[in-house]
Structure formats: C-alpha cells, structure tokens
Amino acid sequence: MLWYALRRLVLALPLLVGITFISFAVIHLAPGEPVDVTGGTMNTKSSAQARQLLREMYGLDQPIAVQYWNWLGRIARLDFGRSFAPDGRPVLHKIGERLPVTLMLNIVELLIIVALAIPIGMASATRQYSVFDKVTTVFVFVGFATPDFWLALLLMILFGVELGWLPISGLRSLNWEYMSGWRQHWDFVSHLVLPILVATFGGLAGFSRYMRQSMLEVIRQDYIQSARAKGLSERVVIGKHALRNAMLPLVTILGLSLPGLIGGSVIVESIFAIPGMGQLMVQAVFERDYPVIMGNLVVVAVLTLVANLLADVAYGLVDPRIRLGGRGRR
Amino acid sequence: MRAVLLVLLLAAALAGCTDRRDDVAVSAAPRPTGDRAYGDTLIRALAANISGLIPNIVGDKYSHDAVALVYNGLITHDKDTNIVPDLAESWDLAADCRELTFRLRKNARWHDGRAFTADDVVFTYQLMSHPKTPSPYKDDFEDVTSVEALDPYTVRVRYKSSYANALMIWGQSMLPKHLLESYMLAGKLKEAPQNFTTPVGTGPYKFHEIRAGEKIVLVANPDYYAGRPYISRIVYRIIPSQATIFLELKAKGIDQADLTALQYQRQTDYPAFKSAYNKFRYADKVYNYLGLNHTDRRFADKRVRQAFAHAINKRDLIEGVRFGMAREATGPYKHGTWVYNPNVRTYPYDPARARKLLAEAGWTTKNAEGLLVKDGQPFTFELLISQGSDEGKKIAEIIQSQLRDVGVGVELRVLEWAALLKEHIKKHRFAAAAMAWSTGLDPDQYSIWHSSQTGPDEFNFVSYKNPEVDGLLERGRRTCRQSERKRVYDRLQEIFAEEQPLVFLYFRDTMPAVAARVQGIVPGPIGIDYNMYEWYVPKQLQLYMSE
Amino acid sequence: MKHFWQAFAKNRLAVAGGAVVLVLVLLALLAPVLAPADPHRPDVHNMLGAPSAKHPLGTDQLGRDVLSRMLYGSRVSLAVGFVSVGIAAAIGIVLGAVAGYRGGLVDATIMRLVDLMLVFPRFFLLLAVLAFLRPSIWTIMAVIGLTGWMGVTRLVRGEFLALKEREFVLWSQAVGAAGFRVVWRHILPNAMAPVLVAMTLGVPAAILTESGLSFLGLGVQPPFATWGNILNEGKDAIEIAWWLSFYPGLAILITVLSYNLLGEGIRDALDPRLRQSRRLAASRG
C-alpha cells in the first residue's frame, strides 16, 4: 500500500503539469479577456490605450505556449503571480486572506453533516419504510430541493429582523475591535450560525441517502444474516459489521468533497456577505483574472489528487479484500 | 412574520402612485432637527467588492465611491453640477481654453502631514500621462502639453489646442508625489501599498482600515482644509446581495444604501421604514438603449430605427423594468442639465406609425407567421444581452414582445459580459444589443459617435457615420464657451433624435435611503453624496459612540 | 419480467411515485392545452400579482402568468433533469465498471481522466463549447451530462473494487463465466445502490444547473421559462412575491420525491440479492 501511494505521488507531478497546461490553454482561449465587470453598462472613460497597455503588461499578446511556460517557471518557484484586478495584489495574499473562513465553514459543515447523516442513514435503513424512514426521506429531500437563498432569507428575516437574536450578515460586528476576548469569539460564532445552518440543511440529503442506501445493501448480505444467526446483538451487528462495510460509498463521496473544502458557495457567501473563496473566484472568472484562476486551480488540483489517493487508500482500510495497483485481474 | 405581512398589505395598497417628475425628489417625514455636532458613525452598504484604492487607475464605481472622501481634485462639482473650487482656490482660464492657471489652497495637507503643493499637481499629471500608467482616464490628459509649478502654490497648464474639458479634467484625484513617485516610474503603481492598504489623500476622511471583501473604515480628518467633518467614522460594508442589504436596513444594521426600484416602490412605504429612513431619488447619468448595428443593411435604414422607436412603448418599459423609476431618454443627455435640449423629435408609442415606417422601408408583406418579409427574407434578428443584467433581460423581453406586434421577430441571447464584449461588440459581430452607457458630466461624447471611433477597442461599435455629427463633435470639444457649445449640442441632439443612431430608451433613477438621524443632506441633480463631509447627527440622536 | 411487475405493483409507494412522474410528463406534454395564458407576453400593469382566480399561481416580474410558465417550463426542466442524469449515469457506470473490474493501467488511466475532469474549470469549458454550438435544450442536456459523470464513476468503481473480491463473483469466475457476463449479471446489480442515490440527487441538481447555464447563454434563452429560471428570477422579489420561488421549488421537490420512490421501487423489485442468495444457496446445497 505504501509503495502504491508513493508511486501515485510521483506520477502526480506530470499529471499536474498536464492538467494545468490543458486548463491554462482552455482558460486563455475561451471567449473573453480581462475586463471590469459592469454587466451591460459601458463607460466611455476606459481608454483604448490603457487596455492595450494592460495587455502588454500581462503578456497577453504572446503565444499561449510562451505564456504557459512563463507561468510554469514562476509556479515552480512557488510564485503565483499578481492579480490582474486593479489592486494588483499577489495571488497568494488574495487567496490566503479568504481561505481560512471558507475552510473553517466547510469543515464545520462537513463534520455536522457526516455526524448527522450517518445515524440518520443507518436508522432509516434498519427501519426501511417505517414512519421514521418516510419522515427523514421527505425532510432531507426538502432540504435538498429548497433553494439556498430562500432558506437563507427566511432565516435572516426570522432570526435577524423579527427576533433579533442573530446578526444578519457579515463576519463580525462593527464594534468587534472594542469587545472583550470571549465576546469577540461569541460575536464571530453568532455570525456563522445561519450560514452553517443553511449549508448543512442543503448538504444533509446527499450523505444520508448514500448511507441509507448502502446500509440497506449491506444488511441483506449473507454475513450479516449469519452474524445475526450467531446471536450477536443487533447493536454489534449493525454498529460494527454492517457500518464498516456500508462506509464504502461514503468514502468515495468524502473523497470527492475534499477539494470542495476550499471552494465556497457563491450564493451563501453573497447572501450572508461572507468574504470567502466563492466570491473571489466568481469575480476572478468574470473578470478573467487569469493568475487568480490558475492559482486556485493549482490548489484544487493538488487537493483532488491527494483526496482521490486518500480515498483509494481508505477503501483498503474499510474493506481489506480490496487490492489496488499492481497487476490488474484478468 | 409581522413585517412580511405588513409589506404584503402595503404592496397591495400602493399600486397606483404616480405623481411628480422633478429632477430630485425627497420623501422625508418631518422630524426634529438638532444642532450640528461631532461624532457618530455612518454605515453604508457597497454592493460589490473594492478593486483598488487609487481612483486614478480604477474604473469601477464602487471603488470610486469607497475612497471619494479620501481624495480631492483641484476642482469639484456642486449640487447643480457646476464646477467649484476644491484644492484650487481659484483659477484663470484663457479665453481660448489653451492656458489655465490654478492658485492652490495653502492649508491643504496630505494625511501623513506633508503639505499639498504644486509639485503634487505636476506629479499627478505626470502619472496620468506616464506610458506605464494603466489609467482608464488617460485620454483626458492627451491634449495637455505642459504642467508647470510657477511657485509652490501656483500651477500653469497649457493645452495643444483649445479644449472644452480643460478645467473639468482637474477633478481627477490628486496623488501624493512623495509616496507614489517611485512606483509610477517603475510602472508598478498597482502594487503600491497606497492602492490596497494605506491610501493617502487630502480629503475630509482618512483611511483607517480595510478588510478584504468585508469592510472599509474611514475616520474624520481633523486637519481637513475646510475644517473637521462632523461624522467621526464612515464604514463601507461590502454586501453583494440586494436582498441582504435591504434586510440590514430594516434591522438598522446599516444607515445608507441604494434601494432597488422594487424596494423603493413597493417595500418601503410603511411607517416604521419611513420614520427610520429618508428616501431620495435623482436621475442617474446612465441610460439604457437598444443598439442596432448599422453595418446590417436592415438597420442602416433610419426609417427602420425610427419604426422601432415608435414600436417600443417606453412608458411600459419604464414601468415594467424600473417600476416607473426612470425617465424617457430623448437622446444621450440627461434632462435637467445645461446641455439637454427638450425641443427634439420624440417617439410616442405608435405601432401604426411604426408599421408605416417599416412599409416605407420596403417591409410590406407578411409571411404565415406574421413576420414582415422583404426580398424573401423574414425580418428577424438576434438581440444580445449581458449575463448578470436583470435589467437588460427584462428590457429585451419587453422589446421582443412589442416588436413582434409590428411583425418583427426578435431572438434573445444571453452572453457572459467578457465574452459578449470580446467576441461580439469589439468584432462588430452582432445585429442588436440591449446595453447601457454611463455618461460623464461633460457633454463631449466624441468617442461614442465619431465615425473615426469604430476600431475594436473603440466605442462607436454600432458603426454610426454622419459627417455633420462628426463636425459637431469636433467643434464641441474644441469650443470652450458654454453658450457656443450649447448651440453645437442642441443641434447634435436634434440629429440624434431624428436618426436614432441608438434607440434611446431611458435614464434610470438612483434611489438612496439614509438613516433619518443624519442631517445636512441637500439633494441636487448630482445626487446626495457630494457634501457628505457636511452631514451631521445631532448629539441626542447619535447612535454610535465614537472613539 | 413478470416477476418484476408483480413485485413492483405490490409496492404502493413506488406505484404512487411512478404515477406522479407520469402525471408530470403528461402536464408537460399538454402544456399548450392546459396553460391559461401566453407564457411569454409581458403585462406591465399586472406585475408581481398574488395568486388569484385569473392567475392561480400569481404573476412574475413582467406580469406573466406563472402557472403557464411553470407548465411550459416543465418541458425543459423534466427533460433536462432526466436525460442529462441518464447520460451522466451511463458514462459513469461504464467507465466505473471497466476501471474497477479491470484495475491496473486501465483503472489508473480512467481515474486520472476523472481527476482531470474534476479539476477542470467547468465555466471555461462551457464558454468554449458555446463558441462552437448554438444554444439549445440538446446542448444543455449534453453539457450537463458530459460534465457530471465523475462522481458516479468513482462510486461504481469503489463498489466494483469491493465486489470483485466477494465469494459469489470469485465463484462464478471460477466456474468459467465470461468477464462481461460476470459484470453484467453479478457485480453491476449489486453496485447500483449508490448510483441510484446519485441519480436521484442528480435530477434536481441538473434542473437548477440548467438555469445557471442558460444564464450564461447556453441552453434555454429568454423569454422561455424553466423551473430553475422562474425560481432564480424570483430571488429579488422574495419578500413580496413568495409564489415566484415557492412553486418552482415545490415542483422540483415533488419531482425528486416521486423519482426517488420510483427508483427505490424498481430497485427493490429487481433486487438481485434475493435471487442471488437463493441461487447461491441452491448451488451450495
């Protein structure tokens, strides 16, 4: 397994170069070029001269291959370049100042979702077609089909405007600087309650459905039946034997979610005015801020490769019969 | 849920509200006023992120708004858009507008304590004209031949030829030479710390703090040349969602925000809102239009464009898209400005007239689908709209339905903005587009209408060509007596109204709401923000403790 | 087959789910007959009207009848929901099965392709596609399907990795069953559980993705309505016109729920395990 993981890691490097090259080419060749986003309104005060100057400054007048080579050279020295936006700040700063919030929100959400989804999924599977099963099924699908913005606004109206229990938007109150230590923490946490609630409600359906479905499969297996026949308590049968085997799809889904940890939901972020990765990236994409887009892409690519490797390794842990790498079966 | 119910009731009660049509409107409940006092914080909402803090190299409105109080120009505008002194105390403009001498204020200081002098003015000019400065306002300074400091408080500017905008361009923010010169010379102005964390200006407010994507905090500048401003702190909160901004207003989390037309008309007329906020309304300098590509044979015929102008019911359009919060455009100039000419041909909604004009242009027969046909071709075209512009989309949907009534088929196509510009507008590969122009305070629109301005990065992308218009545009920007310019632009508007080079639709209104405790606001055609440093909150009404 | 129908018919919930799906499809097909008003004609004197006798589901920002727009919109939304999910599932199942069963280089190649697709900035891919194709409902179904198969691939592959080591598979291989037969008869049916979930969840996701893509100019253009578009356009008016986001949301919910019930019913009726364990028992016996 270790050998397998090492080999995958070594192979990841050329793969990474390949992925970035293809992406770089498509990003630069897709219609559009760096602009201010003003959605349909043009201003006469944006001189042709200035735009030509910017093109030259950014090297956009050079062939794609040359641009990519220059970019790769800089990335090799861990220089992600500077944003094309008028602030011209280093890409790493821009990503760095937004990543912590996004990462924290996403990790908390994922933990809550997994913590809730596993018991919900197990309970509805062991009691298939019971009232509990039906209610949770409807509940999680309601969560999944409810538009984020709808739920967010309803909660904001209720808890923010009507009851006044929680702040409506932002990360900190305006007088945050003048608060005592623990008040600062509470203030910060209270700003995050609603966004986390919204995201969790929406994400619960996926995990709990996978859990329920694969649990249903597992408990019909022979070895579960025989474990029961051996007189093991239901708790041991379900909690130990069945759960472990039912984790397989969850491992896959978790692996697929891992790179998403650094990407924020644009809708949730803009509704709650949270300065996270989602907003940064959408703006970068619409403005064709190539260095920021590519910087983010490199991080996502590395995370994806690592996550999928981790998932493959985890398969072996969940089900020791799984063998990876080596020669394929004939 | 109480408020929701209330809003629903009010929405029902409010359906017919059509009164005034001045240039500025205020709806304020009478309330006790108090004496001017220092203190309090004003929290404003910004709907988009800030892209840079040196306004001279930034194009977007939000970034400009956020630092408007940090910088000054040599001149500024009063509420009626007249040019008035700012950092320049007075000036002499030669009769031919080729020489301009400014006398600067002697008591203006940069926020870091240095005196503001003529050297800074010379520097700002150098910066704007430096080949490595990526400024969208570069063209403004093209006609300047020299800027000299005659003494520390006198600056003389010379121009290549007489230039109508000679004075106006000095509204550009003055920048500190001692901080930015090295960045300018290296061509790295964007990377200067003043552009992101520590902007230094001469304005009434000093920059205190920025949290990326979250907020910007300004604090009163006690050494401001016109005296310390009253409100101690101004906070700009970045809130991208209009719905959230509105909820924050309701919860009193922010003090000032621009309302949407829907909010203004249907969601803010209940007593609690009215007693907490004053609503204002003034015409913005942005107008929406239907752009038709003149290289398309069908649209080269002015009768077709005139027919469209008659076929589009602009009143319905304004009602449908802006809930009435806009005014029909008769040309590219806003009503209520000195240049506006009210005596031009107008296009009232008249489908019969439109059909007649189309018939004169040769569109006489109809096919089975009811579309006009000429030379065997049905009259259909594709109308491009920008993604993200809800307004553009609604305009297009209404136009589509109204043109169909006169036998013209319109297919709509939404495109992402950067792609729309690069692949269609710049390459002139489009039949029609529904967009908007943001105009300047000066009437010179050479770059939009002159027949020489049809290159890929240039703005006459509909390829409008008219020799008389070319002549007028050239004269307009080379003449500096307002009365003479007025004649030039009056004629220009007559031609535009007749020819409809773009089908002019409407000038939209801007509708800010400001917390009622804030006083000293004097709305004018230019808006309300121009005198923010004079706003105040009487002591007994102050909400936030300062310092 | 007969066996399947009997099992299916016994499952009342599944039959109900199937009936609702059928009704939805019928409503979509009969939209021109059922719609009370022209779904595209703006009426600026009747904007954001609450549900009434004339407009049972209210009117939208331009005064258009929401019920009519919902009916016409269901044609696009249902088609996109089902077809694009079908495309994604088909690709995902085939690639996942091949990767999981064959392993080795084949597996590595397919999985790296998955990695590439996952990392690839979808937005730019769409823009590039847009440069070559005219927007239409077919483009949008293809695009959503072709960019949405990676999750299914990894799920199926994970199942295959585990299942191919199980006794019943090893046994049937030992008896000399051909690879394809083993996969088709023995492994695939057992690997379908997570695919079913992915497909169920994929339907609403595709319906909403469609409106996002149409927004970029790919797919259905205004004034044509889809559930996703009506919902999105209702965003700004949510406080005074709840019906604009409520009804499309409800329609999507009903679709998912009935699709889910139907899917589970089919799966239970097909349940390979029961037959499998019977057969295994018989062969052991």
Image (cartoon, coloured by chain):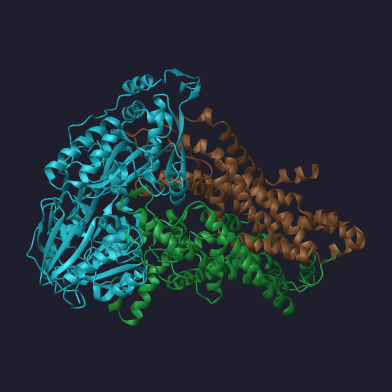
Chain colours: A green, B cyan, C brown
Q: Quadrant of the C terminus of chain B?
A: bottom left
Q: Nearer the viewer, residue B1 or B356?
A: B356
Pinpoint residue A92: horizontal percent, then vertical percent.
Answer: 46, 73
Who's the residue at 85% across and 54% down the image? Answer: C181
Q: Residue furthest top?
A: B365
Who's the residue at 11% across and 54% down the image? Answer: B94
Q: Quadrant of residue C175?
A: bottom right
**Does residue B508 lie above or below A311 as drawn?**
above
Q: Quadrant of residue B353?
A: top left
Q: Nearer the viewer, residue A152 or A20?
A: A20
Q: How many numbered marks appear?
A: 0
Who's the residue at 51% across and 36% down the image? Answer: C71
Q: Is residue C52 visible?
A: no
Pinpoint residue C47: horizontal percent, then vertical percent.
Answer: 35, 37
Q: Is residue A142 visible?
A: yes
Q: Residue furthest bottom?
A: A181
Who's the residue at 91% across and 63% down the image? Answer: C174
Q: Quadrant of residue B491?
A: top left
- Answer with left or right where residue C210 lies relative to residue C186: left
Q: Nearer the viewer, residue B358 or C67?
A: B358
Q: Residue furthest left?
A: B35
Pinpoint residue C200: horizontal percent, then vertical percent.
Answer: 62, 52
Pinpoint residue B403: horizontal percent, then vertical percent.
Answer: 39, 29
- Answer with left or right where residue C21 lies relative to residue C63: right
